[in-house]
Image (tube, rainbow, N blue to C red):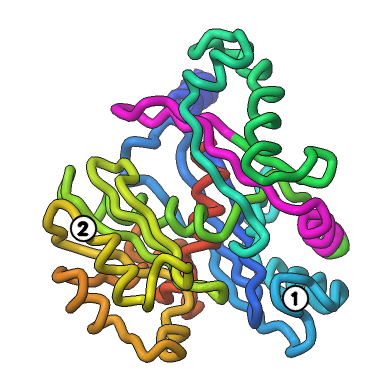
Amino acid sequence: MTLRNSWIEAVQAGVQRFAAGIDVGSQNVRLVVVSQRARARACPSMQIEYACTVPLPANAMAGNEIADRQSVARALRDAFADMPHSCATQALRCAMAVPASATLTATVPLARLAMQSGCAEDGGHELAELEPAVMNEVERIAGLERHALAVDWFVDDRPLLARSVTIAATGRQHLEARIECAAAAGISLTAIDGEPHAALRAMRYAASHELDPHEPYVALWIGTDGVHGWRLVDDTVAAEMHYPAPEHSDLADALRDLAHGPMLDCALVSGEVELLDGVGFSIADIADILGCTVLPFECAALGSVARQLNDPLLHEAAGAVAFGLALRGVFE
């Protein structure tokens, strides 16, 4: 009877889900593994199980292309090598990022796609019928035929928000290179995502823990292709920007345009913050222009940290993409 009760209690508590986020950057491979009880999504039960940064050789990447697949595969093996046994033995959902410059992301109202496909908006298993409408939307936005694209999509049905479909697409060659490197390292990928979208997911999660509800804020992600920014009101993207872009004379102009609206109390910044030096900018400059406090992203503040993890990635703004990818694995 004791064993039976223990089993029932374990089921009621919910299965613990494990997921890994893999960010292959221009200089490093970053890995974050998190876990969460499947039935405790509304509770602060996130556990950071593992974090690791492995440097890449100088010739491993050429822009957003993987130039040396063996070097990247070796770095991936090294990143996973010291992962705790308790993680390695789990059904680990692994997601990898694709560079922003090689990725197209879009958020489309579910009702619109449902209308195009002829299925009910809340159709449960019938949502599989959405795929043709999703692919038509991707072809329209990307201007490419679907056979040249690798597409991933999911329904975002967070409470209090209108249901929408988030789509990520990239040239098939970029995905195939990453799948090949992961397979050579013994890793099976379950999802792809664009770097900015993964970082935004991480910053939204941070905002839900660190900011007051309904507080308007700005989220910024700094990558090798520039600065991506979003102004969020009630957890909905009210405006977004990318710099460099023809409509902005400089980064300050882009930030001022993004901040136009309700007064901001806070901005979250993630990514490779040191790249701001290349445009003569700093965190203090961002705070002055936006007129609010700026908080660098730090994944260690967003969940209990397992064991004695001490990788600098836990406290670096550059960890946002890997953390956002891992979040996707436990939330879906």
Q: Can you identify the residue that label 2 sits on?
A: 260
Look at the numbered discs 2 and 1 and tell me whether their residues touch, using CB distance below 8 Å. Answer: no
Say what secondary structure mark 2 lies in: loop
Up-down: is 88 above or below 122? Answer: below
Residue 282 in which image quadrant:
bottom left
The amino acid type of the residue labelled 2 equals His
Query: Would you say 133 lies left or right of 44 here?
Result: right
Where does the C terminus fall, quadrant-wise? top right
**10 Å neighbourhood of mark 2: few (<14), some, or many (≥20)?**
few
User: Which label's residue is closer to the chain start, 2 or 1?
Assistant: 1
Which sits in the foreground, 76 or 222?
222
Q: Is residue 277 above or below residue 198?
A: below
Label 1 CA crowd tier, 10 Å (few <14, some 14–19, many 20+): many
Percent of width and height locating residue 67: 83, 77
The residues colored magenta run 154-183
Q: What residue is disc 1 on?
A: 75
